[in-house]
Image (tube, helix red, strand yellow):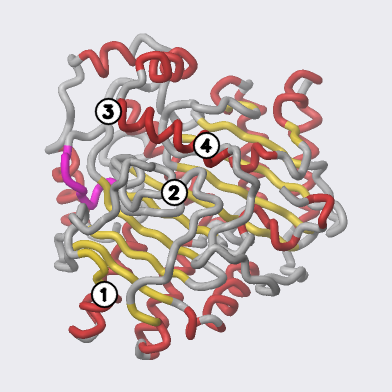
Amino acid sequence: MTSQTTFDEASSAFRAHLHDLTTPRFTTAAKQDPYEYATFFKDNQAPPWLFALTQAWAKLFEEPFKGVTNDGTVREGLFEARDEGVDIHGVVGKAEELLGKLDAEEKKKVMYPVNAKEWRAWSNPEILLRPFGLRLEEVPEATAQSILSIISASLSPEGYQKALAAMRINHFLGEIVKLPQIMNKYSYNFLVFGTPSTSPSQPWGWLLYGHHLDISCFFRGPQVVISPTFTGAEPNIIDAGEWKGTAILHKEGDLGLELMQSLEPGQQKQAQIFKELKDEGMTQTGDLTTDRWNKDDQRHLCGAFRDNRIVPYEGVRVSAFTPKQRQIVLAIADEMQLYLPAKSRQLRSQQIERHFDETYFCWIGGYGDDDAFYFRIQSPVVILEFDHHSGVFLANAEPKKFHTHTIVRTPNAGDYGQALREKEYKL
């Protein structure tokens, strides 16, 4: 955030919604480690709405991977193998350094076949539902730093700083609600798939997952696919302590609002698929594998375990936009795909632009300066979701701008690099 006034306003906004930490929810959790916390959640099925969703997720996890589509049919020929100039030697070097630090048991825990199902095991709540890989808070600091060095080498410098910001905000949230053992900068799990290699014929990758940060990174030689990703924050600033001044996920929202406000009234009406953030028209049948809205995901459709979801195109077509508005679309895509190295991100931007005739922009909620909202940009080659949420560890019952979720998906089997995998490496 650029202005101190805006930062102060954001600080006041979230601090007006702090919970009473003497209630059983917080006093019970304060006595638990992450595994006890997860066991308590499963044994007590509480909160019931989240427990029900995790059961739906378990069902979805058992499905073979297909990919997100707009109509149930995977479109072929959208993605090609190419040299993106990724410093794959540097990434592999960092991965080999990590593996050299680990003992046999740790290697067994962190390493999976390149086509392992665990690629898809990530989820964004703070509850450790599937404890795969190595957990950063459970390894020596040198090992945690080595894991971070792989992530740093894989991402753009600015993307790595965004990931660190998400982890630090998670730490800050843990301090605010006095649950540092549940939420901290290292409460994330890390997995390596395949054998790190510079060769396109030997693909590999890694997965980092935890509360409000999930990054899937697949390498095919000097080509990288960083998708799906989930980046969130509650709150989306740090207003005290070591990392005071940290802020994420504001630029994406500001650009989306600028785009919506710039549309002609007729286009705004077409783009606004629901007027209210929890609209009566949103499908709720009780089947959480297909419902339009649930208390955890709220408006976003492509989060954890939604690898095969059918998401029809909605809203207004981007090809009807002015050149300036199209540039805003590309700026949103650039910011939401910031994890990609510069050249890869540029190539992705060009790919997205080539499909503008098949790209749709939709909106849920109001579009005044102070309104919370959701928007999605969707085409055959990318899905970008931005959503303001109600409180989970803060007490706001309605969505506010200080709790944000963002998701990047590559539809038509692009996630996890599936479209680039040879048959023997398919998920």
Label 2 CA crowd tier, 10 Å (few <14, some 14–19, many 20+): many
Sequence-wise, which precedes: disc 2 or disc 3? 3
Tell me the SS state at disc 3.
helix
Spatial CA distance of label 2 from label 3 is 20 Å
| Marker disc for residue 260 | 1
Q: Amino acid at mark 3?
A: Ile
Image x and y of residue 173, in percent: 32, 32
Which quadrant would residue 167 be assigned to in this image?
A: top left
Image x and y of residue 182, in percent: 41, 23
Sequence-wise, which precedes: disc 3 or disc 1? 3
| Marker disc for residue 368 | none
Q: Which quadrant of the rendered structure holds the N terminus?
A: bottom left
The residue that disc 3 covers is 176
Start and end of the magenta stretch?
396-403
The residue that disc 4 covers is 59
Q: Are marks 3 and 4 in contact (CB under 8 Å)?
A: no
Residue drawn at (40%, 54%) of the image:
301
Q: Amino acid at mark 4?
A: Lys
| Marker disc for residue 231 | 2
Sequence-wise, which precedes: disc 3 or disc 4? 4
Q: Are marks 3 and 1 in contact (CB under 8 Å)?
A: no
Sequence-wise, which precedes: disc 1 or disc 2? 2
Spatial CA distance of label 3 from label 4 is 34 Å
Q: Amino acid at mark 1?
A: Met
Image x and y of residue 52, in percent: 37, 31
Sequence-wise, which precedes: disc 4 or disc 1? 4
